[in-house]
Image: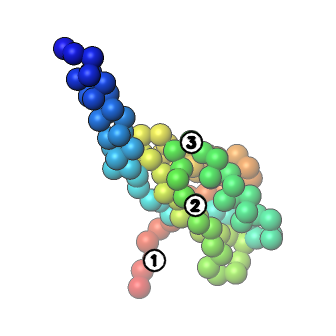
Amino acid sequence: MSRSFLAAALAVGLLATPFAARAADTTVVLDVHHAGCVLCGPIVKSTLAHVKGVSAVRVSQPNGMSDVTATVTYNTAATSPAVLIKAVTDRGYPAEIAKPSRG
């Protein structure tokens, strides 16, 4: 094989890698408990954002109570909901996958 063919094949492979990684992105919604103070939401968001494989985190407090909802987009090849739950639980905010609302 020629060097130029190998270089071209490598370049195509490197360009295709981000597309393959994005194909494994998914979103999970977590109910995070004991997060009622003004600093808790940002701590939860920062904690989740620092988990390897997480690409986006949105935290909201839908009912004004002590729980927050975290919507996390992550790469399934790099992390899982169990890892996300453990990360925030280890920071003092027990979490679970949100149950779908009945409406």
Q: Earlier in the sequence, mark 1 or mark 2?
A: 2
In which quarter of the view is residue 35 placed?
bottom right
Q: Name the residue located 64 percent from the left edge and 81 percent from the top edge.
A: 63
Query: Which residue shows up at 38% across the image and 50% down it?
Result: 22
Image height check: is 83 above or below 9?
Answer: below
Query: What is the distance, in whole Å, between disc 1 and disc 3 at their CAs?
Result: 29 Å
The type of residue carrying mark 1 is: Ser
- Tag 1–tag 3 contact (CB < 8 Å): no
> What percent of the width, then of the height, locates residue 94?
66, 56
Work out whether residue 69 can be spotted.
yes
Please, which residue is most extreme toward the left here?
1
Q: Residues within 10 Å of mark 3 (few under 14, many from 20)?
A: few
Residue type at mark 3 is: Lys
SS at circle 1: loop
Q: Circle 1 sits on which residue?
A: 101
- Disc 2 residue type? Val
Residue wearing tag 3: 52
